[in-house]
């Protein structure tokens, strides 16, 4: 039975068959039938046209809805670029299933989803489709699996776990992704897990090389290691025994002196060698270095006697920075005539070798009382441990220091003259070259040696030219030991106002014991106080501690250049040498008186026997046989008289200079520096210009470099 259509609430149109079979409605006449039939047909046509319009409208709405869906899918494609676009496939599928879409539209009751304007909101509004409905294609499989999980290694965090980073989820919700373990057909391996988290190396390499623990002593001694001439010696401190063994086949070791801060040893050739000479012999200054602060044990409570002794021994050692400053001064002043020739420095580690211990014992056994060594006996095990550090400063052998010599044995007044003025010229050139102050120029810090190496120092060359003004004895003087010295590391002409880091100096106020020595024991201790007063207040006799407010007002420090301190030390060395000359001159006069009295007694006895005949015999011998000898004796006597006159003249000048340098007349003679004294000597013709001009010294290499290529067995210096 056909369905009766009802449009806009009207009654159904008349049907003949239906009307004949039912008597519900009355039948009109024939005319009325034709008219009503034509009217019903018109209504049906209008109704069909309206219905066709409704269907086309629905189709248009469906197409519009599909376009919106496609637009939504394209918007999702911009969010996740790694997901293949299913737009075209979906278009084909939608075209084949328009009926289902229509049914869905009718089921929804004509309700239309509102499309969001921004892609970020699409993800939340789109309905989730079951994974079973999605078409299984390679693109969809890759889209479902997503990006591959890449292991992530952090190089900044040592404690980071080795875990794969989570892959970013695609923004599309049409195909929800399952976990990676489910999407992979290969079953996961059941690996044993570590019982405790392991610390991973920063290096991504599996076989990481363990780092070596740096030696703290290398970093501590780095300022000295970098000054070593030998490349191997710059890496780390050299074992004392190994260094000593490299020198012992060629050189003998002898201790010659010691000071408050170190000991001095001399290396002498054991035998003649084709590649070595006496000029290659060196002097070594052995300086014990303080250990690092971290290695010193912390004291709690009352210290024992052994601990107190150890602390006192450490206090007597030198700091690395102090020794580095002294070596910088040695290098700075090496080319100035009259200053020591620096060769090398070596940092050693450990106790002294048996050769040096034996040399120490030989030097100490020959002394008594206060003249014995102030340093520990290296033969004892407790004196130095295996980590004891040493700075060995190697210098050219400058000869013997004045403390171990008598001026009467090296030329008397002539020796004093040569030594004093050569030291004065060296200091004057040091002031001009580097604004140098020695500040510790005692007799032990001046060494002399004969210019002719084959001539013994105890027998200086005889005076042969009285017309000259310097160099009567052929002795060379050298200034050594710059522990307390001050110098400008750049040339004063280039930097008139240097920075603090361009000046090498030692603040003596940090060590007040320097100024507290007993002058009754040695005059040298008084000189330190004279130097302090002259530096601060231009008054050697000033009580600096009592006038400290005035000192602060003046503003002078030990960093500054105060050349008057060099004049104070020149006064001291001239005073000490002239004291020796005066005592030797008194002894000579006493001996000469005895000789004259003996000659008179012999002449009286001979006159008693022979009388005039004896005197006549002497005249005859002179006339006949000894005429030539008499002339020679006369010339010798005349020359000796010239020498004696020269000696008196030089002694008179030295006494005059001694008065000028006297602390009581300090500053009154117009002398404010050593350069002023040199200018006065030239003005008074005590010295000539040729005496002032000298050739700079040549730099030399270290002994270790010299002996490295030598062969001990044959002594010919062949390479190993």
Image (tube, rainbow, N blue to C red):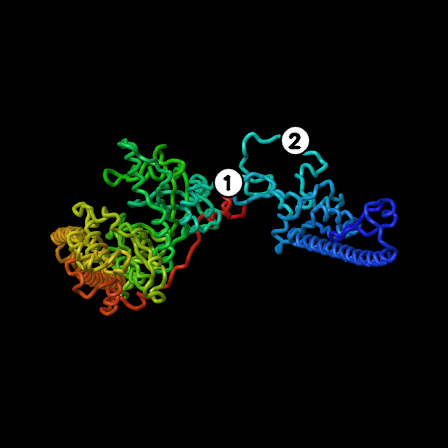
Q: Could you say which is closer to the camera, residue 334 or residue 576?
A: 334
The part of the image, by quadrant, that contains residue 329 is bottom left
Q: Quadrant of the N terminus?
A: top right
Q: Could you say which is closer to the camera, residue 574 or residue 208?
A: 208
Q: Is residue 584 visible?
A: no
In the rendered image, residue 196, in percent from the top left (x then y), is placed at: 54, 31
In the rendered image, residue 197, in percent from the top left (x then y), is placed at: 54, 34
Q: How many marks?
A: 2
> Which sits earlier in the primary sequence, circle 1 or circle 2?
2
Q: Dot 1 lies on which element?
A: loop
Please name the residue shown 66% across and 48% down the image: 126
* Residue under numbered circle 1: 212
Q: Dot 2 lies on which element?
A: loop
Q: Nearer the viewer, mark 1 or mark 2?
A: 2
Marking on residue 190: 2
Crowding near the residue tagged with mark 2, few <14, some 14–19, many ≥20 C-alpha atoms within 10 Å? few
- Disc 1 to disc 2, C-alpha distance: 37 Å
Q: Could you say which is closer to the camera, residue 229 or residue 599?
A: 229
Q: Quadrant of the C terminus?
A: top right
In the rendered image, residue 58, in percent from the top left (x then y), is placed at: 74, 54
The part of the image, by quadrant, that contains residue 434 is bottom left
């Amino acid at each position: 039975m056909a369905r009766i259509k009802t449009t806009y609430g009207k009654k159904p149109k008349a049907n003949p068959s239906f009307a004949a079979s039912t008597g519900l409605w009355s039948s009109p006449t024939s005319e009325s039938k034709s008219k009503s039939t034509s009217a019903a047909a018109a209504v049906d046509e209008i109704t069909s046209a309206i219905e066709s319009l409704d269907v086309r409208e629905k189709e248009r709405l469906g197409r519009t809805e599909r376009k919106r869906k496609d637009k939504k899918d394209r918007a999702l494609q911009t969010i996740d670029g790694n997901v293949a676009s299913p737009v075209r496939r979906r278009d084909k599928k939608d075209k084949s299933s328009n009926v289902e879409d229509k049914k869905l539209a009718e089921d929804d009751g004509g309700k239309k989803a509102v499309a969001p304007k921004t892609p970020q909101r699409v993800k939340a509004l789109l309905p989730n489709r079951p994974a079973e409905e999605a078409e299984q294609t390679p693109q969809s499989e890759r889209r479902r699996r997503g990006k591959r999980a890449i292991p992530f290694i952090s190089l900044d965090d040592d404690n980071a776990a080795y875990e794969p980073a989570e892959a970013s989820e695609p923004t599309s919700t049409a195909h929800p992704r399952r976990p990676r373990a489910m999407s992979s057909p290969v079953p996961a391996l059941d690996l044993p897990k570590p019982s405790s988290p392991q610390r991973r190396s920063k290096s991504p390499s599996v076989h990481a090389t363990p780092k070596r623990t740096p030696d703290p002593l290398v970093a501590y001694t780095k300022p000295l290691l970098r000054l070593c001439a030998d490349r191997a010696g710059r890496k780390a401190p050299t074992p004392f025994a190994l260094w000593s063994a490299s020198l012992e086949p060629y050189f003998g070791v002898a201790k010659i002196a010691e000071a408050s801060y170190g000991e001095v040893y001399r290396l002498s050739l054991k035998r003649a060698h084709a590649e070595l000479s006496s000029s290659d012999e060196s002097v070594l200054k052995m300086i014990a270095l303080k250990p690092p602060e971290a290695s010193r044990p912390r004291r709690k409570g009352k210290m024992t006697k052994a601990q107190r002794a150890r602390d006192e021994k450490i206090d007597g050692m030198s700091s690395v920075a102090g020794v580095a400053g002294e070596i910088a001064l040695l290098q700075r002043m090496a080319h100035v005539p009259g200053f020591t020739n620096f060769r090398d420095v070596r940092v050693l580690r450990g106790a002294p070798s048996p050769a040096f211990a034996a040399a120490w014992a030989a030097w100490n056994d020959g002394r008594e009382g206060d003249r014995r060594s102030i340093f520990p006996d290296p033969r004892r095990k407790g004196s130095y441990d295996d980590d004891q550090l040493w700075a060995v400063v190697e210098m050219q052998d400058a000869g013997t220091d004045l403390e171990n010599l008598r001026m009467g044995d090296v030329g008397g007044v002539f020796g004093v003259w040569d030594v004093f003025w050569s030291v004065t010229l060296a200091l004057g050139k040091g002031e001009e070259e580097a604004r140098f102050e020695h500040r510790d120029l005692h007799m032990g810090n001046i060494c002399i040696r004969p210019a002719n190496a084959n001539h013994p120092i105890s027998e200086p060359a005889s005076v042969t030219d009285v017309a000259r003004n310097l160099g009567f004895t052929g002795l060379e003087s050298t200034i050594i030991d710059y522990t307390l010295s001050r110098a400008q590391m750049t040339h004063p002409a280039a930097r008139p106002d240097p920075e603090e880091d361009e000046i090498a100096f030692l603040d003596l106020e940090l060590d007040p014991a320097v100024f507290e020595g007993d002058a009754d024991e040695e005059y040298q201790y008084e000189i330190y106080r004279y130097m302090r007063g002259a530096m601060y207040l231009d008054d050697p006799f000033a009580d600096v501690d009592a006038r400290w407010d005035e000192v602060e007002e003046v503003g002078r420090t030990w960093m500054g250049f105060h050349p008057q301190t060099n004049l104070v030390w020149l006064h001291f060395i001239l005073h000490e040498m002239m004291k020796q000359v005066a005592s030797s001159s008194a002894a000579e006069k006493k001996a000469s008186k005895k000789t004259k009295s003996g000659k008179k007694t012999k002449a009286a006895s001979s006159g008693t026997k022979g009388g005039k005949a004896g005197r006549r015999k002497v005249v005859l011998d002179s006339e006949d046989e000894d005429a030539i000898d008499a002339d020679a004796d006369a010339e010798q006597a005349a020359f000796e008289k010239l020498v004696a006159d020269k000696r008196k003249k030089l002694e008179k000048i030295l006494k005059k200079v001694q008065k000028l340098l006297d602390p009581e007349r300090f500053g009154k003679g117009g002398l404010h520096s050593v350069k002023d004294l040199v200018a006065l000597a030239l003005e008074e013709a005590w010295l000539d210009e040729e005496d002032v001009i000298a050739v700079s010294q040549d730099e030399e290499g270290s002994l270790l470099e010299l002996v490295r290529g030598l062969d001990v067995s044959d002594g010919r210096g062949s390479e190993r």
